[in-house]
Image: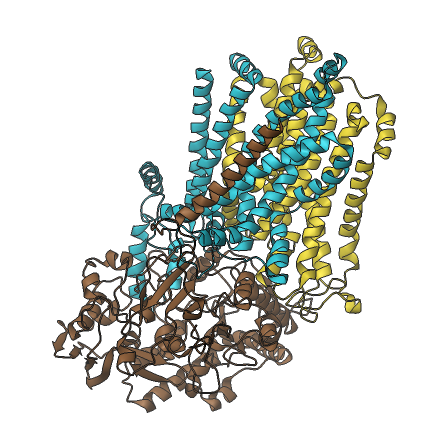
Chain colours: A cyan, B yellow, C brown
Amino acid sequence: MLRYLLRKLLVYSLTFVVAVTIDWSIPHLMPGNPVLTLMSRIQIQNGEVAQHLYDSYMRSFNLDLPLWKQYWFFWVSLFHGDLGTSIMQFPTPVSTIIVHAMPYTLGLLIPATLLSWYVGNKLGALAARRKVLDNSLLPVGYVLTATPYMWLAILMSFLFAVTWQVLPVGFAYDPTAGRGWSLSFGLDLFRHWLLPFLSLFLVSCGGWAIGMRNLIIYELESDYAHYLESLGAPRKLVRKYAFRNALLPQITGLALALGAVIAGALVTEIVFSYPGLGYQVYRAITNQDYFVIQGIFLFIIVGVLIANFVVDIVYVIVDPRTRIGMQEGGQA
Amino acid sequence: MSAPANVSTVREGGELPAGAASRAPDEEAKPVSGLRETLYFAVRNKKLVFGLAVTLSMLALAIVGPIIARHPPLEYGGRLSLAPTTHGGYWLGTTLLGQDVFSQFVTGLRMAFIVGVLGGGIAAVVGMVVGFTAGYRGGIVDELLNMLTNVVLVIPTFALLLVLAAYLQARGIVTEAIFIGLTSWPWAARAVRAQTFSLTSRDFVSLARLSGSSSRQIIFKEIAPNMSSYLFMMFILLFGGAILIAATLDFIGLGPSNTISLGMMMQLSVQNAALQLHLWWWFLPPGLAIMAIVGSLYVMNVGLDEVFNPRLRSM
Amino acid sequence: MITRRKRAAAGWVLAAVGAIAVIAAFGTGGAGATWQAKSYPRSQTLITSGTQWGNVVSMNPFNTATYAAGTIGLVNETLLRYDPLHNTYISWLAKSTKWTGPKQYTVVVRSGVTWSDGKTLKASDVAFNVNLARFNTSQWNNLYQNLKLPIQVKGNSVIFSFKGTPNYVQWQNMIWNMPMISPVQGKTIKTAQELTTYNPHNPVGTGPYKLDTSGYDVTTRVVWVKRDHWWASDQKVAPSPAPKYVIDLVNTSNTNSLAAVLTGVEDLNNNYLPGVNKLVDSGKVQTFFPKAPYMLSANTAWLEPNTTKAPLNDPVFRKALAMSIDVNKIVSDDYQNLVLKASPTGLLPTWSKYVNAKAVKTFGFKHNPAAAKSMLLKAGYKTDGSGMIANKDGSKIDLEIAVPQGWSDWEAARDMIIASAKQAGIRIHAKVKDYNAWQSDRNTGKFDLVVDNAYQISDNPWTYWNGIFHLPIITSGTGQTFANFERYSNQAAWKLTQQLDRTSPSETATIKSLNNSLQTVLMKDVPMIPLWYNGIWAQMTSKYWTHWPAATGGRQYIPAMWRGYLQMTGIDTITHVKSTRQATGG
């Protein structure tokens, strides 16, 4: 078990190094020069002055060093928790930007992912149980899971914010709100959070429901289920086992889902101008702020890796079969 | 952000690979009682027929639409912000700048199918190659390929596309499809690996190995045919996934640069305040079309599953 | 089973609530939970947006690309202000400014001005600020190098003596653009680099507002709160601004900005919002002009030809190209008449007094594709098999045009340029480049044609000429240039531009003749092709605030929070708005 974990850890570390290297190379492989973008926003009439300022910025971003040195410094500063400096938001550290935006994204992602997983699986299990539900819920599930995140977001924004004007769009709270621990501010946050949350939740929910429904049907048609039934086990018990077994692959799916939900969160945040990481990275993309892009992606890489690792461990704990299988696979 | 590559994974993560993983592969070790029987059940499966009908009618529109459209999709010709009308061929109205929405829509539809087939196809091929090799060889090869899969899964695909976008002068739909294909295969590889893994230990594979067949022969002659229906279904899901990923990329402005797509239509409509100006004919059709195509593909997939897998037909 | 499920469900709900609480925790009230949070009363709050792309991170008034909207104007003020609509300077922190000799400039500092930390503004504070230009990262460093040091301070006066002929134009421009920061805070700036990284947590200024630190949120907004006393209203130089708070929001998408304006979330929005003309026409939104062009003009959008490449190195070809472009279509279809077509001189409407109508008549160009084509044929250009214009040696012409990818209004303009040039037989194709590649190629001369708008409205057309005629074409180690992107080499024109910079404002005849000569060169040689004037985008709603600036009536101010615009007459917009709720006590 420990050997298995250690090996996993090694694989994950290697993956981390490779992924981070790719991530690092983004700003450095790009043609053009991000400092020029910054320069173009400062109205400078004198060429010499512009040159001085340009040189100063180049030094600030270490862009005047040879590439290998830049790569080395990148790792050094990474271990000091330094993700670099934003170009467009000079001289703000990228980590500051992440810290400010992260709560919004996590506040969307975690409830949307977990709740959709929970509700979706429940609905899927229900659908597998009753023909009527199967025929009504399933089509809805398919429609939802096939909907592009941003389109659902656009649609909801059009209906709730533009046509009926019952919910706000843009920002995480009302511009006139004073921030602090209060019920009114909490409600305000909730109202701004609801639409982005719903568009993430609904799309994911559809996917989980369909997945669970199909898995249970597989399980119910499997040999052990038939065997149990032939032994005269109550149908309820058989279904319970089917649900338990079907849940396992859904747990793996949860880790895999994370990356996708992040993409969903990105476009959702864009549509609703919700100031999370997705919106930040989008702004950075449109402004070619490579260090912000790099930093946020790094953050996501780490998040996805950790989530995968956790699920690996959870899976081993929950399903003893894998434990044996993995050890055999390792010895082979 | 591995995200877009995973859009498919979320959905199918719960759907196909998982469902299939728990399914005993030997059900297919014995070929289903002939093609005729499959066909018999196929035409009687409502899900399959419905899914196929919707997909094919969208495909027909994608083929015929651009031919019957009266205006080039990118031409600024018509009256500005025209509601749908029969006059002048602006059947779906015009954009804020006077472009023909119908023409853009059907062109976008065509692009969606190209991305789906090409992107889904490439992803399926890469996923199969990696999955077969990893599952059959096992050991260190498996470990290395697993790592590669993980890297692709977690690297920020958007970021890669960003670099690519800067280098490729004109980004076409084909480039985008290839890109999607090369980044969205990980879950497919994992699923194929799992299947191969369990098939490899079966008697008929051991037999083939003993008779001196090469690995490649075993994979293509023994293993792949035994999971052909599975692979086909995987392709369908990758197809739908590719369309969704393309829509996401296009929406954030990383799409093709020399044409119009459904995702770009959504992007442009949002950029040009179509919501506030109530130009619903601009932003509703592209999303509806994606929903129809991808949704019907998924429905078709379940239908196919029931056809290929006799035990499920009772439902 | 059921109870367990219920409990599980309750757990999930709790988790969700917890997650919301995590966000809520982000608000740093610190005073403990209450039912009703302190919020900014809407009737006393002016909400603006349209300046801040990305997070609000900088209070450094020297970083003119990122400082929070209002840093210059609401907090840090300038010695003078400039009113482009009436072409006058407004004495501000300076009671008066004057050229007191051929090489001497005297600023008399206004008395009774207090910093927000309670100190009084002194002449030495002004000298301190000008001395910051000694760092070579200051945009005024070249002017500083021409100063005799030390700067003399006598009583309320600061006297600047110049070594050589002063750059009158640039100096004047500096005087109304240089922010006055508190020396107490500014003394931390000790190196050139520190000038770029200077970022006070709570900037001390002389202006009517100060930062409200509790409301300031990097991702969302900056909140300015009114000071009890502001010298300008105390001294009756300007009305006391009615809004107690000014909140500037970061930009959202066009769609959401428009929604914010329509639902009364924002009072003033300075984004380009496509289609806003419809909402103006239906009375939902207000603009400076009630009809087209709706907006005042901010800068000239032009087509930059690479004048070092054939056939674009030929003035005849460039002029034919200029004649082939149907700018009217761009203005009416692409911009829905939200912009104005540019004059052949490209001089902004505010500089119209410098336009020489006779020269325009003689040398200007009009849209006429047929004439353009025949002009080219007459000049010796051939036609190729498809009837398109070919080089004089018969080789094919296929020019490349680039705009930054995703700038949808420019992309539409690009397509219209391509289509209309085709009418004149000029073959152009679009080349897609993302912003960085577009910019880098522009700066290093790897382009045929680009649409561009580099220079903003100012107090003197010199800034415009400098952008066009600047020499040498700066090519440092990186091969970059910061002006004259069309790489137009005309020593005579550059000399005239420099001469204009060094002409004392009193020599009006010389100034006029220099501007005449420069616009003649521009129209004859067409180093760049003026297309349209981008607007000072400003849409206003009167749900909470009225008395907005307008073309007619006494409030001809610029309704913009943009960087550099508050010290024009943007601040007057804020000091003149009136609350709609004032009568009822708000």
Q: Relative to B268, say whether C586 is above or below.
A: below
Residue A300: give x, y in percent of width and height: 46, 40
Quarter of the C terminus of chain B within the rendering:
top right
Q: Is residue A46 visible?
A: no
Q: How many marks?
A: 0
Q: Is residue B77 left or right of residue C311?
A: right
- Residue C242's place in the image compared with C87, above or below, is above
Image location (x, y in percent) of residue C253: 52, 60
- Nearer the observer, C496 or B247: B247
Residue B151 in the image: x percent, y percent? Answer: 50, 33
At x 67%, y 35%, the residue is A123
| Residue A69 appears left or right of A121 | left
Q: Please say whether residue C582 is visible from this viewpoint.
A: yes
Name the one closer to the observer, A217 or A184: A184
Horizontal side of B210 relative to A73 (left or right) equals right
Quadrant housing residue A222:
top right
Whether C582 is drawn above or below B133: the answer is: below
- Residue B26 appears at what percent x and percent y? 72, 17
Q: Which of these two is toward me, B237 or A318?
A: A318
- For image coordinates 44% across by 28% down, the residue present is A14
